[in-house]
């Protein structure tokens, strides 16, 4: 027993020594651009302007959703009482699945949907259930951890393909004679913000008799004229599509869904262990999500998507103007709410993040191994609830921090950094 504890403590100490130990901050208030946080290792809460949430439409603290949540709890109670196959499947869950199937029906013939407690579980479910022993999973190399873990759980053989490399994938598929082939990709890459070549991937799926599993965690609610996500944005339609959408990001609540041809969904109900062997999410969550979908597809959703686009354009224009001319910091091309400012080495990324921190701005600094070595970055996440002044404040602070940190030896932290540390 104590040997196990010693071992774990040793590993934690090693992480600490490499500045890789993760610590949790405590949010004292609801998710919003201005949030009161008790930062790890500090005692006093601070109110900060945050650019790091996945709440892209600013719905996570919307009063209409809190009201729907309360109404759902009054109607159905707090707990579902069981798994979906043993009476935990409420009318609210069924209505939500019908609505999502309806949303995806222009893109997937005979679409049905299945609601999951989380996107992580949905990805485990899809890949472990469809990726049987006779299948091969073709996995995009920048895929989200939940897709990687789903592929590990599957009995299928897994082949990675190089990031967005359609030609390489084409050759890999051509060389494969497995009866079941699954191409698996994020729609929007979570550390980069750019889109996968989804239309090209679908063409490959058609050509090679494969399925295309798309994880639209960062596109659902944001992309497409009424927020239905990447399939709507690109106008795609095929019965080979299996779409995973998450409902804890732009939709502002929690959970996820899989949309696919009804035979695929029927099969998942029979075989997907992360669906079968878990307690159904509270029906109130599904009830609140119905209200969220109504907002997303209505005028309010359209207004919020337009606001988000305006902030994205403002940020990109503003940052381009303050970036150093030597190209030592660059804004990756991204049309989405995820805007990575690549700074290169880890120390510089941490230094810039600390400068922002000292000015009351929170932006995630992402380092290897989450991103490739030499591409440490600030991952700026925008939301429709950011105001023009918020983005202006960030642009100014980034410009100042980059100006100050150029050519400065990395070993000497400033007063502000020492205070923020
Ligand atoms: C967040 C995320 C998930 C997991 O969804 P949760 O509902 O948070 O479990 C899956 N895939 C991608 C690409 C994500 O960004």
Image (cartoon, grey):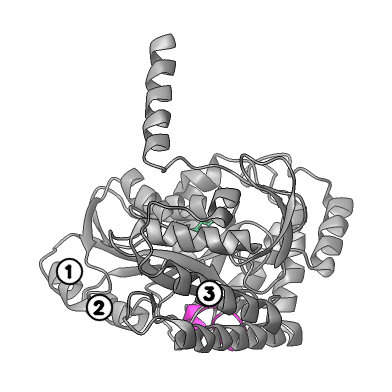
Q: Residues within 10 Å of mark 3 (few under 14, many from 20)?
A: some
Report helix, strand or loop for mark 3.
helix
Q: Quadrant of the N terminus?
A: top left
Residue at 43% x, 50% y is 124
Q: Is 26 covered by the magenta stretch?
A: no
Q: Of the two numbered discs 3 and 2 on the same chain, state the one appearing first in sequence.
A: 2
Residue 376 position by quadrant: bottom left
Left or right, 391 with reference to 142? right
Query: Do tag 2 and tag 1 residues touch (Cβ < 8 Å)?
Result: yes
Residue 359, image x, y percentages: 64, 64
Q: How far apart, in angstroms, are the residues tagged by discs 1 and 3?
A: 49 Å
Q: Which residue is label 2 attached to?
A: 204
Residue 187, image x, y percentages: 42, 72
Left or right, 322 with reference to 41? left
Q: How crowded is mark 1: few (under 14 residues within 10 Å), some or many (20 or more)?
A: many
Q: Of the two numbered discs 2 and 1 on the same chain, state the one appearing first in sequence.
A: 1
Does the magenta stretch mainly form a helix, a strand or a loop? Answer: loop
Between 287 and 230, the one nearer to me in the picture? 230
Between 28 and 250, the one nearer to me in the picture? 28
The span shown in magenta is 223-233
As drawn, the label of residue 400 is 3
Q: How many marks?
A: 3
Check the image and report above or below for 363 versus 397: above
Q: Which residue is label 1 attached to?
A: 173
Residue at 45% x, 55% y is 123
Residue at 43% x, 83% y is 237
Check the image and report above or below for 135 versus 103: above
């Amino acid at each position: 027993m104590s040997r196990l504890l010693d071992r774990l403590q040793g590993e934690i100490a090693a992480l600490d020594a490499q500045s890789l130990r993760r610590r949790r901050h405590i949010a004292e208030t609801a998710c919003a651009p201005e949030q009161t946080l008790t930062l790890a290792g500090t005692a006093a809460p601070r109110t900060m302007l945050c650019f790091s949430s996945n709440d892209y439409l600013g719905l996570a603290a919307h009063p209409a959703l809190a009201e729907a949540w309360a109404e759902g709890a009054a109607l159905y109670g707090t707990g579902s009482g069981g798994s979906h196959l043993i009476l935990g499947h409420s009318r609210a869950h069924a209505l939500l699945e019908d609505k999502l199937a309806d949303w995806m029906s222009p893109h997937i013939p005979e679409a049905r949907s299945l609601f999951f407690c989380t996107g992580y579980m949905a990805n485990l479910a899809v890949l472990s259930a469809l990726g049987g022993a006779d299948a091969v999973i073709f996995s995009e190399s920048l895929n989200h951890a939940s897709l990687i873990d789903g592929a590990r759980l599957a009995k299928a053989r897994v082949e990675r393909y190089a990031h967005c490399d359609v030609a390489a994938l084409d050759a890999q598929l051509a060389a494969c004679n497995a009866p079941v082939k699954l191409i698996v990709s994020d729609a929007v890459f979570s550390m980069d913000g750019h889109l996968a070549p989804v239309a090209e991937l679908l063409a490959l799926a058609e050509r090679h008799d494969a399925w295309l599993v798309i994880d639209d965690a960062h596109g659902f609610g944001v992309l497409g004229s009424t927020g239905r996500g990447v399939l709507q944005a690109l106008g795609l339609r095929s019965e080979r599509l299996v779409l995973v959408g998450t409902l804890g990001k732009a939709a502002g609540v929690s959970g996820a869904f899989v949309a696919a041809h009804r035979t695929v969904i029927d099969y998942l109900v029979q075989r997907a262990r992360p669906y079968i062997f878990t307690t159904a999410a509270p029906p109130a969550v599904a009830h609140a999500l119905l209200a969220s979908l109504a907002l997303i597809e209505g005028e309010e959703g359209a207004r919020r998507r337009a606001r988000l686009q305006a902030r994205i354009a403002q940020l990109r224009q503003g940052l381009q103007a303050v970036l150093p001319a030597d190209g030592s910091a660059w804004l990756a091309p991204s049309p989405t709410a995820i805007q990575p400012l690549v700074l290169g080495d880890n120390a510089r990324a941490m230094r810039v993040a600390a400068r922002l921190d000292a000015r009351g701005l929170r932006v995630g600094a992402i380092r290897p191994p989450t991103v490739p070595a030499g591409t440490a970055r600030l991952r700026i996440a925008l939301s429709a609830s950011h105001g023009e002044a918020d983005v202006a404040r960030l642009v100014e602070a980034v410009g100042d921090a980059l100006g100050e940190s150029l050519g400065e030896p990395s070993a000497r932290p400033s007063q502000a950094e020492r205070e923020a540390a």
